[in-house]
Image (cartoon, rainbow, N blue to C red):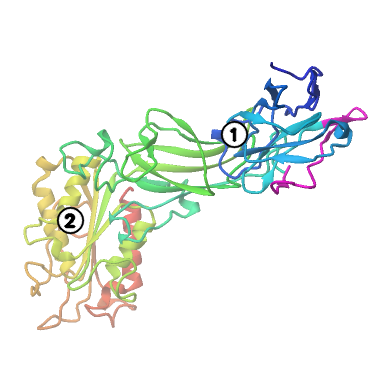
Amino acid sequence: MRLRSMAGGPGALLLGFLPVLAVSGVSPPPLNVEAVCAGSTPGQVSGLMVESYNPATGEMALAYDPACAATDHHLEYGPLADVATLGYSGQECGLGVSGTVASFQPGPGSYFFLMVGSDGTGQEGSYGTMRIGGAAMERPADPSQFSCAFTQNLAAACDAPPPAITLAITAFRPQTEFYGVPFQRTAVPAAQRISPGVGVRVNGDDDDINGVQDRDQVDVAGENDLVEVSLSVDPPCVNGADYILSRTDPSLRVWADAGKQTPLLADNDQITLTFTGSSMSIWVESVGTGSGDLELSAQAAGGGLLASDLAHFFSFTSAVIALGGEGQVPADPPLEPSNHGTFQMAIQLYNMGFDVHMYDEDVVTADGSGAAYDEVVSAVHDREVVNVAIFGYSHGGGSTNDLATRLNANRGAIGAFAIDYTAYVDGIDNKSDIDISTEMALPPSTLYHANYYENPGCGLFALCGGPVAGADINLNVTATPWGGALTHFTVDDAPEVTSAILNQVLTMVPR
């Protein structure tokens, strides 16, 4: 036997030998529960029917449409004689969200009953509406809570206007060389998220060394070219709203993890996200040069934008190499905060959105080979980089020349690129750890070379730089009003030197 409401509105009596009170919702229709994040306030049940009734036992089977966002339901019931005042006499709790109740038996006699959605942890939703004097009013909640206690919350009912929503996209700088080493995990400031935007390396290298470019495969062991992005929503759960992530350029792909196991945006340009809390992390990959936007938006179920936030992403076309002096260890922050000016500049450029790699100068051997050379070769050959900048202090200046020399000599095998900028700060040749010769060679094919040095006179244990023929800038700081007291061990920390190099990189090297 299947009994339906014959009166046609919320809360109408079901006609038949067993009076039943049904609760149904009002427009708009309820959301799919899977599209609503955990913790939202349950709305109204949109339908209740008696599927079968056994007159010998009084047992009946019920069917209902689950309330939007509900994670549980319970039945409220009372004697039919008290239906006008909704005199509840009992509850049947923990009925789940299946849409069916296999067996319900309120006891002998005639009863009214209705289904109420809940979050399963203490909050219940609407009991539906009834008409008094022609006006729709909320039915009162059960004040007794016989079997299980609930607090009613109607603030986010399905048919209520959504609350104010705040969305935020926080992007992070690239992983270099590992995440947090040597650069700290660093968020892109909000003022830079649109201009210049968030830099991403084109993922054409082979981090898992399997002969396949990483952009052409999933599940990449050792992957380090994706950038982390945190998506935040407040509140995390809003009835009547969907959270949408969309992109404007298919060269941007989005993954749920840093190792490319679970795609979010691959062949699709948007996805509806489910938040189980106030934030989630995603990972952005670039598979080709270009730029595009990622937008997080909250959209009403019936259409219309409720809130949004945007971040711009671009593919790096340059690589910047910073080489310290003898005994200096690349670290963020520098191991000696008032020293290690090369690494201080590297950190500042990293925070300005450049793809920076800082190294101990000895990773560059006398013939220019080593980790820094391999990084530039990979950038040009695999990541579509066409601009290179190199600067170094002391032995790092000598290594700058050695690296540029090898890169220039092997152009045919590496690919097309320009060495846009090089700089020495008191450059010393680096053929060995005890080399004290002044580095005076111009790095081959550099488009701009800056040379800052102190030279009060060189001799045994008095290291100093010197002029470089063909350099665009040759500045002996000893002859300036601000640099007369600088030594080999302090010249790389002088703000006049570091600020000049930073400004030159910003002017001459595209990101």
Q: Residue at x 32, y 58 (%)?
A: 504
Q: Residues within 10 Å of mark 2 (few under 14, many from 20)?
A: many
Label 1, secondary structure: give it: loop
Residue range (magenta): 130-154
Q: Examine the structure image and report whether residue 392 is included in the region drawn in magenta.
A: no
| Pick the front one: 360 or 474 | 360
Q: Where residue 241 appears, x then y in whole percent? A: 61, 35
Distance (Cα) linking label 1 and label 2 = 59 Å
Check whether the beta carbons of the residues at disc 1 and disc 2 lie within 8 A of each other.
no
Task: Please indicate whether residue 385 sits to the left or right of residue 102 in the image.
Answer: left
Quadrant of res 105: top right
Query: What's the mark number on residue 142?
Result: none
Q: Examine the structure image and report whether residue 134 is included in the region drawn in magenta.
A: yes
Q: Which three-letter amino acid code belongs to the residue tagged 2? A: Ala
Q: Where residue 476 appears, x then y in whole percent? A: 24, 73
Q: Is residue 153 visible?
A: yes
Quadrant of res 282: top left
Can you identify the residue that label 1 sits on?
A: 97
Q: Where residue 216 appears, x then y in whole percent? A: 25, 33
The answer to which of marks 1 and 2 sits earlier in the sequence is: 1
Q: Residue at x 58, y 31 (%)?
A: 98
Can you identify the residue that label 2 sits on?
A: 372
Task: Please indicate whether residue 156 sits to the left or right of residue 210 in the image.
Answer: right
Relative to 400, does residue 461 appear above or below in the rendering? below
| Pick the front one: 464 or 368 | 368
Q: Residue at x 10, y 75 (%)?
A: 436
Relative to 295, does residue 60 appear above or below in the rendering? above
